[in-house]
Amino acid sequence: MQLKSVSAFIFPAILAIGLAGCADGGKAAPAEGGRGPRAGDATVPVTISKVLQKAMPVQLAVIGNVEPFSSVQVKSQVQGEILSVHFKEGDDVKKGDLLFNIDPSPFQATLDQAEANLAKDRAQLDNAQQELKRYTDLAARGIVPQEQVDTARTTAASFAASMKADQATIDNAKLQLSYCSIRAPISGRTGALLVHAGNLVKQNDVPLVIINQVAPIYVSFAVPEAQLPEIKQYRSAGTLHVRATVPNDNNAPADGTISFVDNAVDPTTGTIKLKGTFANADHRLWPGQFVNILLTLTTQPNAIVVPSQAVQTGQQGQYVFVVKADQTVESRPVVVARTMDTQTVISSGLKPGETVVTDGQLRLVPGAKVSFKSASTTAAGTR
Protein backbone atom coordinates (compact mmCIF):
# COMPACT_ATOMS: atom_id res chain seq x y z
CA MET A 1 0.00 0.00 0.00
CA GLN A 2 2.91 2.33 0.80
CA LEU A 3 4.70 1.50 -2.52
CA LYS A 4 1.62 2.39 -4.52
CA SER A 5 1.36 5.83 -2.94
CA VAL A 6 5.05 6.66 -3.75
CA SER A 7 4.57 5.73 -7.41
CA ALA A 8 1.53 7.88 -7.61
CA PHE A 9 3.65 10.81 -6.51
CA ILE A 10 6.75 10.27 -8.80
CA PHE A 11 5.03 9.68 -12.18
CA PRO A 12 3.09 12.99 -12.23
CA ALA A 13 6.32 14.82 -11.34
CA ILE A 14 8.20 13.30 -14.28
CA LEU A 15 5.30 14.18 -16.60
CA ALA A 16 5.39 17.77 -15.41
CA ILE A 17 9.12 18.07 -16.11
CA GLY A 18 8.66 16.73 -19.66
CA LEU A 19 5.86 19.18 -20.38
CA ALA A 20 8.04 22.03 -19.15
CA GLY A 21 10.80 20.95 -21.56
CA CYS A 22 8.36 21.04 -24.47
CA ALA A 23 7.19 24.47 -23.44
CA ASP A 24 10.83 25.81 -23.77
CA GLY A 25 10.19 26.67 -27.40
CA GLY A 26 12.81 24.25 -28.80
CA LYS A 27 15.79 26.54 -28.12
CA ALA A 28 19.23 24.98 -28.78
CA ALA A 29 21.93 24.58 -26.13
CA PRO A 30 24.58 27.29 -25.79
CA ALA A 31 27.48 27.23 -28.25
CA GLU A 32 30.21 24.68 -27.58
CA GLY A 33 32.69 25.89 -25.02
CA GLY A 34 30.51 28.90 -24.16
CA ARG A 35 32.10 30.92 -26.97
CA GLY A 36 29.63 33.72 -27.09
CA PRO A 37 26.05 34.55 -28.07
CA ARG A 38 24.20 32.98 -30.94
CA ALA A 39 22.76 34.86 -33.88
CA GLY A 40 19.69 36.75 -32.74
CA ASP A 41 21.05 37.32 -29.21
CA ALA A 42 22.07 40.76 -27.90
CA THR A 43 24.65 42.66 -29.92
CA VAL A 44 28.33 42.31 -29.05
CA PRO A 45 30.31 45.56 -28.59
CA VAL A 46 33.48 45.48 -30.70
CA THR A 47 36.18 47.76 -32.04
CA ILE A 48 36.52 47.91 -35.82
CA SER A 49 38.94 49.14 -38.47
CA LYS A 50 38.88 49.58 -42.21
CA VAL A 51 40.96 47.44 -44.55
CA LEU A 52 43.43 49.81 -46.20
CA GLN A 53 45.38 49.67 -49.44
CA LYS A 54 48.66 51.56 -49.27
CA ALA A 55 52.38 51.36 -49.94
CA MET A 56 54.23 49.16 -47.46
CA PRO A 57 57.97 48.47 -47.25
CA VAL A 58 59.28 44.93 -47.56
CA GLN A 59 61.67 44.60 -44.62
CA LEU A 60 63.78 42.12 -42.67
CA ALA A 61 64.21 42.50 -38.90
CA VAL A 62 67.36 41.03 -37.30
CA ILE A 63 69.85 41.69 -34.52
CA GLY A 64 73.13 43.40 -35.47
CA ASN A 65 76.49 44.05 -33.85
CA VAL A 66 78.30 47.37 -34.11
CA GLU A 67 81.90 47.24 -35.38
CA PRO A 68 84.47 50.03 -35.75
CA PHE A 69 84.99 51.26 -39.29
CA SER A 70 88.70 50.79 -38.67
CA SER A 71 90.68 49.58 -35.67
CA VAL A 72 94.44 50.05 -35.19
CA GLN A 73 96.75 48.71 -32.50
CA VAL A 74 99.39 51.38 -32.06
CA LYS A 75 102.82 49.75 -31.48
CA SER A 76 106.36 51.05 -31.23
CA GLN A 77 108.62 50.47 -34.24
CA VAL A 78 111.77 51.02 -32.18
CA GLN A 79 113.03 49.97 -28.78
CA GLY A 80 113.35 52.60 -26.09
CA GLU A 81 111.88 54.31 -23.06
CA ILE A 82 108.56 56.14 -23.33
CA LEU A 83 109.28 59.72 -22.27
CA SER A 84 105.79 61.23 -22.57
CA VAL A 85 102.15 60.55 -23.49
CA HIS A 86 100.25 63.34 -25.26
CA PHE A 87 96.62 62.25 -24.85
CA LYS A 88 94.19 61.00 -22.22
CA GLU A 89 92.39 57.68 -22.34
CA GLY A 90 89.18 57.97 -24.33
CA ASP A 91 90.22 61.11 -26.20
CA ASP A 92 89.22 61.67 -29.80
CA VAL A 93 92.35 62.09 -31.92
CA LYS A 94 92.94 63.05 -35.52
CA LYS A 95 95.25 61.36 -37.97
CA GLY A 96 98.78 62.67 -37.45
CA ASP A 97 98.30 63.80 -33.83
CA LEU A 98 101.31 63.12 -31.57
CA LEU A 99 100.60 60.29 -29.15
CA PHE A 100 103.93 59.18 -27.60
CA ASN A 101 107.56 60.27 -27.43
CA ILE A 102 110.29 57.64 -27.12
CA ASP A 103 113.81 58.58 -25.96
CA PRO A 104 115.56 59.67 -29.21
CA SER A 105 119.12 59.87 -27.82
CA PRO A 106 120.48 56.54 -29.20
CA PHE A 107 118.99 57.20 -32.62
CA GLN A 108 120.29 60.77 -32.74
CA ALA A 109 123.81 59.46 -31.94
CA THR A 110 123.55 56.93 -34.79
CA LEU A 111 122.49 59.69 -37.16
CA ASP A 112 125.37 61.93 -36.13
CA GLN A 113 127.87 59.12 -36.68
CA ALA A 114 126.47 58.37 -40.13
CA GLU A 115 126.66 62.01 -41.13
CA ALA A 116 130.31 62.16 -39.95
CA ASN A 117 131.19 59.10 -42.02
CA LEU A 118 129.60 60.73 -45.03
CA ALA A 119 131.67 63.86 -44.56
CA LYS A 120 134.89 61.82 -44.26
CA ASP A 121 134.14 59.79 -47.40
CA ARG A 122 133.23 62.95 -49.31
CA ALA A 123 136.63 64.47 -48.48
CA GLN A 124 138.42 61.31 -49.51
CA LEU A 125 136.42 61.20 -52.74
CA ASP A 126 137.45 64.78 -53.56
CA ASN A 127 141.11 63.88 -53.03
CA ALA A 128 140.78 60.68 -55.11
CA GLN A 129 139.17 62.63 -57.97
CA GLN A 130 142.02 65.17 -57.95
CA GLU A 131 144.63 62.41 -58.04
CA LEU A 132 142.79 60.75 -60.88
CA LYS A 133 142.91 64.02 -62.83
CA ARG A 134 146.66 64.45 -62.22
CA TYR A 135 147.52 60.87 -63.16
CA THR A 136 145.39 61.15 -66.27
CA ASP A 137 147.35 64.24 -67.41
CA LEU A 138 150.73 62.62 -66.60
CA ALA A 139 149.77 59.41 -68.39
CA ALA A 140 148.84 61.42 -71.48
CA ARG A 141 152.39 62.83 -71.52
CA GLY A 142 153.85 59.39 -70.89
CA ILE A 143 155.29 60.27 -67.48
CA VAL A 144 153.32 57.64 -65.46
CA PRO A 145 152.05 54.24 -66.55
CA GLN A 146 148.38 53.63 -67.30
CA GLU A 147 148.14 51.27 -64.27
CA GLN A 148 148.39 54.22 -61.89
CA VAL A 149 145.54 55.94 -63.70
CA ASP A 150 143.41 52.84 -63.34
CA THR A 151 144.26 52.56 -59.64
CA ALA A 152 143.30 56.19 -59.02
CA ARG A 153 140.03 55.70 -60.90
CA THR A 154 139.21 52.63 -58.76
CA THR A 155 139.96 54.52 -55.56
CA ALA A 156 137.65 57.38 -56.56
CA ALA A 157 134.84 54.95 -57.45
CA SER A 158 135.27 53.18 -54.09
CA PHE A 159 134.86 56.41 -52.15
CA ALA A 160 131.82 57.32 -54.27
CA ALA A 161 130.22 53.98 -53.35
CA SER A 162 131.08 54.55 -49.69
CA MET A 163 129.27 57.87 -49.83
CA LYS A 164 126.13 56.16 -51.16
CA ALA A 165 126.30 53.66 -48.29
CA ASP A 166 126.76 56.52 -45.84
CA GLN A 167 123.72 58.27 -47.27
CA ALA A 168 121.64 55.10 -46.90
CA THR A 169 122.79 54.81 -43.29
CA ILE A 170 121.77 58.43 -42.70
CA ASP A 171 118.33 57.85 -44.25
CA ASN A 172 117.78 54.80 -42.04
CA ALA A 173 118.95 56.67 -38.94
CA LYS A 174 116.54 59.52 -39.72
CA LEU A 175 113.73 57.00 -40.17
CA GLN A 176 114.48 55.33 -36.83
CA LEU A 177 114.63 58.76 -35.20
CA SER A 178 111.22 59.66 -36.66
CA TYR A 179 109.76 56.51 -35.08
CA CYS A 180 110.53 58.04 -31.68
CA SER A 181 107.51 60.31 -32.24
CA ILE A 182 104.48 58.00 -32.48
CA ARG A 183 101.52 59.65 -34.21
CA ALA A 184 97.90 58.59 -34.73
CA PRO A 185 97.61 56.52 -37.93
CA ILE A 186 93.83 57.18 -38.17
CA SER A 187 91.24 59.51 -36.71
CA GLY A 188 89.16 57.94 -33.98
CA ARG A 189 88.59 57.31 -30.29
CA THR A 190 91.46 56.09 -28.11
CA GLY A 191 90.95 53.22 -25.70
CA ALA A 192 92.67 52.39 -22.44
CA LEU A 193 96.35 53.31 -22.18
CA LEU A 194 98.16 49.97 -22.11
CA VAL A 195 101.74 51.22 -21.61
CA HIS A 196 102.52 54.33 -19.55
CA ALA A 197 105.39 56.82 -19.57
CA GLY A 198 108.62 55.45 -18.10
CA ASN A 199 108.15 51.95 -19.49
CA LEU A 200 110.67 50.38 -21.83
CA VAL A 201 109.06 49.14 -25.03
CA LYS A 202 110.37 46.81 -27.69
CA GLN A 203 110.04 46.98 -31.42
CA ASN A 204 106.65 45.72 -32.64
CA ASP A 205 105.80 44.27 -29.21
CA VAL A 206 102.65 44.88 -27.16
CA PRO A 207 100.19 47.58 -28.31
CA LEU A 208 100.48 50.94 -26.57
CA VAL A 209 96.86 51.91 -27.24
CA ILE A 210 94.03 50.88 -29.58
CA ILE A 211 92.26 53.47 -31.73
CA ASN A 212 88.79 52.73 -33.10
CA GLN A 213 87.30 54.80 -35.89
CA VAL A 214 83.64 55.30 -34.93
CA ALA A 215 82.48 57.86 -37.51
CA PRO A 216 81.56 56.35 -39.89
CA ILE A 217 80.90 52.96 -38.34
CA TYR A 218 79.79 49.48 -39.39
CA VAL A 219 76.91 47.33 -38.17
CA SER A 220 77.23 43.67 -39.13
CA PHE A 221 74.34 41.20 -39.11
CA ALA A 222 73.36 37.87 -40.61
CA VAL A 223 70.25 36.95 -42.60
CA PRO A 224 68.99 33.52 -43.68
CA GLU A 225 70.44 32.33 -46.96
CA ALA A 226 66.87 32.04 -48.32
CA GLN A 227 66.77 35.87 -48.40
CA LEU A 228 69.96 36.13 -50.48
CA PRO A 229 68.27 36.09 -53.94
CA GLU A 230 66.00 38.99 -52.92
CA ILE A 231 68.90 40.93 -51.43
CA LYS A 232 70.99 40.49 -54.59
CA GLN A 233 68.03 41.42 -56.78
CA TYR A 234 67.11 44.61 -54.96
CA ARG A 235 70.73 45.64 -54.36
CA SER A 236 71.49 45.43 -58.07
CA ALA A 237 68.52 47.73 -58.69
CA GLY A 238 69.70 50.38 -56.22
CA THR A 239 71.00 51.14 -52.75
CA LEU A 240 69.56 49.10 -49.89
CA HIS A 241 68.73 51.14 -46.81
CA VAL A 242 69.11 49.84 -43.28
CA ARG A 243 67.98 51.28 -39.95
CA ALA A 244 69.57 50.61 -36.55
CA THR A 245 67.70 51.10 -33.27
CA VAL A 246 69.57 51.13 -29.98
CA PRO A 247 67.62 49.31 -27.22
CA ASN A 248 66.35 51.61 -24.46
CA ASP A 249 67.27 54.66 -26.54
CA ASN A 250 64.45 57.13 -27.12
CA ASN A 251 66.25 58.91 -29.94
CA ALA A 252 65.36 58.36 -33.58
CA PRO A 253 66.90 55.29 -35.25
CA ALA A 254 70.14 55.69 -37.18
CA ASP A 255 69.94 55.35 -40.97
CA GLY A 256 72.59 53.74 -43.14
CA THR A 257 73.16 51.77 -46.34
CA ILE A 258 74.30 48.23 -47.10
CA SER A 259 77.98 48.37 -48.06
CA PHE A 260 79.01 44.71 -47.86
CA VAL A 261 77.55 41.29 -48.67
CA ASP A 262 79.82 38.40 -47.77
CA ASN A 263 81.12 36.20 -50.59
CA ALA A 264 80.01 32.92 -48.97
CA VAL A 265 77.17 31.51 -46.89
CA ASP A 266 78.17 30.21 -43.47
CA PRO A 267 77.45 26.46 -43.75
CA THR A 268 77.22 26.02 -39.96
CA THR A 269 74.37 28.52 -39.54
CA GLY A 270 72.88 28.77 -43.03
CA THR A 271 73.20 32.57 -42.92
CA ILE A 272 75.12 35.18 -44.85
CA LYS A 273 76.83 38.19 -43.32
CA LEU A 274 76.01 41.77 -44.33
CA LYS A 275 77.34 45.13 -43.19
CA GLY A 276 75.66 48.50 -43.09
CA THR A 277 77.62 51.76 -43.01
CA PHE A 278 76.34 54.56 -40.76
CA ALA A 279 77.62 58.15 -40.58
CA ASN A 280 77.35 58.06 -36.75
CA ALA A 281 78.22 61.74 -36.40
CA ASP A 282 76.62 61.81 -32.94
CA HIS A 283 78.53 58.65 -31.81
CA ARG A 284 75.34 56.92 -30.66
CA LEU A 285 76.44 53.62 -32.16
CA TRP A 286 79.34 52.15 -30.21
CA PRO A 287 81.66 49.24 -31.12
CA GLY A 288 80.54 45.97 -29.59
CA GLN A 289 76.96 47.16 -29.06
CA PHE A 290 73.94 45.04 -30.11
CA VAL A 291 71.21 46.89 -32.03
CA ASN A 292 67.92 46.09 -33.74
CA ILE A 293 68.31 46.14 -37.52
CA LEU A 294 65.55 46.79 -40.05
CA LEU A 295 66.64 46.15 -43.64
CA THR A 296 64.35 47.62 -46.31
CA LEU A 297 64.44 45.64 -49.55
CA THR A 298 61.73 47.40 -51.56
CA THR A 299 58.27 49.00 -51.26
CA GLN A 300 55.06 47.17 -52.16
CA PRO A 301 52.84 49.88 -53.71
CA ASN A 302 49.30 48.48 -53.21
CA ALA A 303 49.43 46.28 -50.15
CA ILE A 304 46.27 45.20 -48.29
CA VAL A 305 46.81 46.20 -44.65
CA VAL A 306 44.89 45.57 -41.41
CA PRO A 307 45.80 46.11 -37.76
CA SER A 308 47.69 43.10 -36.45
CA GLN A 309 45.17 42.52 -33.64
CA ALA A 310 42.47 41.83 -36.23
CA VAL A 311 44.14 38.57 -37.30
CA GLN A 312 43.16 35.53 -35.24
CA THR A 313 44.51 31.97 -35.33
CA GLY A 314 42.23 28.93 -35.23
CA GLN A 315 42.33 25.24 -36.02
CA GLN A 316 41.91 25.94 -39.74
CA GLY A 317 44.57 28.67 -39.81
CA GLN A 318 44.44 32.46 -39.62
CA TYR A 319 41.20 34.37 -40.05
CA VAL A 320 39.50 37.70 -39.37
CA PHE A 321 35.94 38.69 -38.47
CA VAL A 322 34.50 40.85 -41.26
CA VAL A 323 31.55 43.14 -40.45
CA LYS A 324 28.85 42.97 -43.14
CA ALA A 325 26.37 45.68 -44.11
CA ASP A 326 23.70 44.38 -41.67
CA GLN A 327 26.22 44.63 -38.79
CA THR A 328 26.64 40.88 -38.49
CA VAL A 329 30.05 39.24 -38.75
CA GLU A 330 31.49 36.45 -40.81
CA SER A 331 34.68 34.50 -40.16
CA ARG A 332 36.92 34.76 -43.20
CA PRO A 333 40.23 32.89 -43.68
CA VAL A 334 43.17 35.05 -44.75
CA VAL A 335 46.74 34.54 -45.88
CA VAL A 336 49.25 36.74 -44.03
CA ALA A 337 52.22 37.97 -46.07
CA ARG A 338 54.14 39.65 -43.24
CA THR A 339 53.67 41.59 -40.03
CA MET A 340 55.34 44.92 -39.27
CA ASP A 341 54.91 46.35 -35.78
CA THR A 342 51.14 46.89 -35.42
CA GLN A 343 50.24 46.32 -39.08
CA THR A 344 49.77 43.10 -41.02
CA VAL A 345 49.94 42.76 -44.80
CA ILE A 346 47.30 40.36 -46.20
CA SER A 347 48.08 38.61 -49.48
CA SER A 348 44.58 37.15 -49.96
CA GLY A 349 41.19 37.05 -48.25
CA LEU A 350 40.30 40.74 -47.90
CA LYS A 351 39.49 43.72 -50.09
CA PRO A 352 40.15 47.42 -49.50
CA GLY A 353 37.32 49.22 -47.73
CA GLU A 354 35.99 46.18 -45.85
CA THR A 355 35.53 46.45 -42.10
CA VAL A 356 37.23 44.04 -39.70
CA VAL A 357 36.94 43.53 -35.95
CA THR A 358 40.06 44.47 -33.99
CA ASP A 359 38.82 43.89 -30.43
CA GLY A 360 36.07 41.74 -28.91
CA GLN A 361 36.60 38.64 -31.06
CA LEU A 362 36.37 36.24 -28.09
CA ARG A 363 32.61 36.85 -27.82
CA LEU A 364 31.90 36.48 -31.52
CA VAL A 365 30.56 33.62 -33.64
CA PRO A 366 29.72 33.77 -37.35
CA GLY A 367 26.42 35.58 -37.80
CA ALA A 368 26.58 37.45 -34.49
CA LYS A 369 25.31 41.02 -34.51
CA VAL A 370 27.75 43.67 -33.35
CA SER A 371 27.72 47.22 -32.13
CA PHE A 372 30.60 49.63 -32.09
CA LYS A 373 32.05 50.63 -28.74
CA SER A 374 32.44 54.38 -29.37
CA ALA A 375 32.88 56.82 -32.20
CA SER A 376 36.36 57.75 -31.06
CA THR A 377 37.50 54.09 -30.81
CA THR A 378 36.06 53.29 -34.22
CA ALA A 379 37.69 56.29 -35.84
CA ALA A 380 41.04 55.39 -34.34
CA GLY A 381 40.78 51.90 -35.70
CA THR A 382 40.08 53.08 -39.26
CA ARG A 383 42.90 55.58 -39.62
Image (cartoon, grey):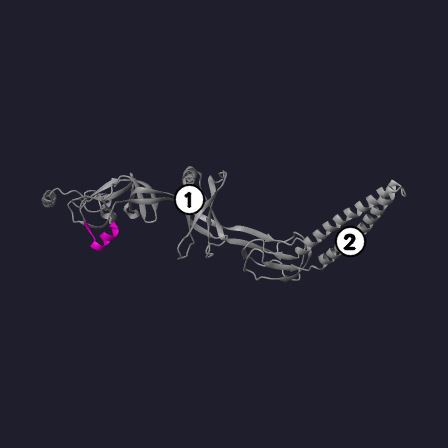
Q: Which residue carries the number 2 mark?
A: 117
Q: Which residue carries the number 1 mark?
A: 240
Position of residue 382 measured from the top left corner of the image (x, y, whole percent): 24, 50
Q: Is residue 375 magenta?
A: yes
Residue in the foreground of this view, choosing between 103 and 311: 103
Between disc 2 and disc 1, the foreground one is 2
Position of residue 169 measured from the top left corner of the image (x, y, whole percent): 73, 51
Q: Quadrant of the N terminus?
A: top left
Position of residue 373 measured from the top left corner of the image (x, y, whole percent): 21, 53
Magenta-colored span:
371-383
**Figure quadrant of residue 212:** bottom right
| Residue appearing at x 87%, y 44% in the figure | 138
- Does residue 107 show up? yes
- Amino acid at dot 1: Leu
- Amino acid at dot 2: Asn
Q: Is residue 23 above or below residue 108?
A: above
